Amino acid sequence: MCGHIYGPCCGKLHDNSILNESRVPSILNIIQQDNNVRFKVYTDRGYVSTTNIVAAYKANRGMDLHQIFHLENKCMSRLRLCGTEHIFGNVTNIWNANCFVRKQKISLGKLFKEYIVMMLLHNAYCCLYYNDVTQYFQCIPPTLEHYFKTHLQNYPPPIDPMYND
């Protein structure tokens, strides 16, 4: 399930810049403070490690990566099934009618709003049917009623005013 969607972003930006603009690090801090939950988001080497975000370990110049860090990178890379790309791929596959997304320009039309609706439908689909992530981590998704009552009420998806009409 997708808990936060941000965009669209115009131009070429570094992944770490988009991450910071999306406010995901501060949202993670709030979630962990309010719910007494502790977790970290594991990313690839293109990001900078912070309190709640751990970038893959990389060796210093001229040195080998310590065996423990190499093993952690290897173990964590196997969990890519719950990565951002996986969620966007699922949305595209489940809602095949949105294949136009690959052809359409984000700044033209209402593509962003349509994509938010598809993401909400994807989350509803995840409530009704188990997916790869729920099966791997053996967690039960919320019921549709709980999802729409609680999650959407507390965490509405941010929509850029530029795209409200």
Image: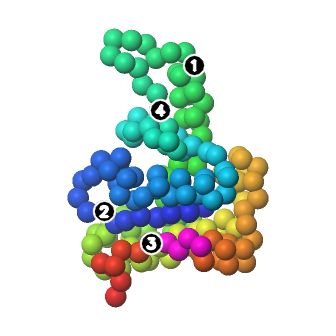
**As drawn, is 17 to the left or to the right of 93?**
left
- Crowding at dot 4, Cα within 10 Å, few <14 / some 14-19 / many 20+, comes out as many
Report if residue 1 lies within the magenta region.
Answer: no
Magenta stretch, residue numbers: 154-158
Kind of residue at badge 1: Ile
Quarter of the image for the N terminus: give it: bottom right
| Label located before the other in sequence (1 or 4) | 4
Q: Secondary structure at mark 4?
A: loop
| Label located before the other in sequence (1 or 3) | 1
Kind of residue at badge 3: Pro
Q: Secondary structure at mark 3?
A: loop
Residue at (63% x, 59% y) in the render: 34
Q: Mark 3 and mark 2: span between their CA atoms?
A: 13 Å
| Viewer-side residue, 62 vs 110 | 62
- Crowding at dot 2, Cα within 10 Å, few <14 / some 14-19 / many 20+, comes out as few
Q: Mark 1 and mark 4: span between their CA atoms?
A: 12 Å
Kind of residue at badge 4: Ala
The spot of residue 25 in percent (x, y) is: 46, 52
Image-quadrant location for residue 125 = bottom right
The spot of residue 135 in percent (x, y) is: 73, 51
Label pair 4/2, CB-CB below 8 angstroms: no
Label pair 1/4, CB-CB below 8 angstroms: no
| Label located before the other in sequence (4 or 3) | 4
Label pair 3/2, CB-CB below 8 angstroms: no
**As drawn, is 118 to the left or to the right of 8?**
right
Which residue does the numbered mark 1 point to in the structure image?
68
Which residue does the numbered mark 3 point to in the structure image?
158
Q: Which mark is residue 56?
A: 4
Which residue does the numbered mark 2 point to in the structure image?
9
| Label located before the other in sequence (1 or 2) | 2
Residue at (45% x, 41% y) in the render: 50
Q: Is residue 53 visible?
A: yes
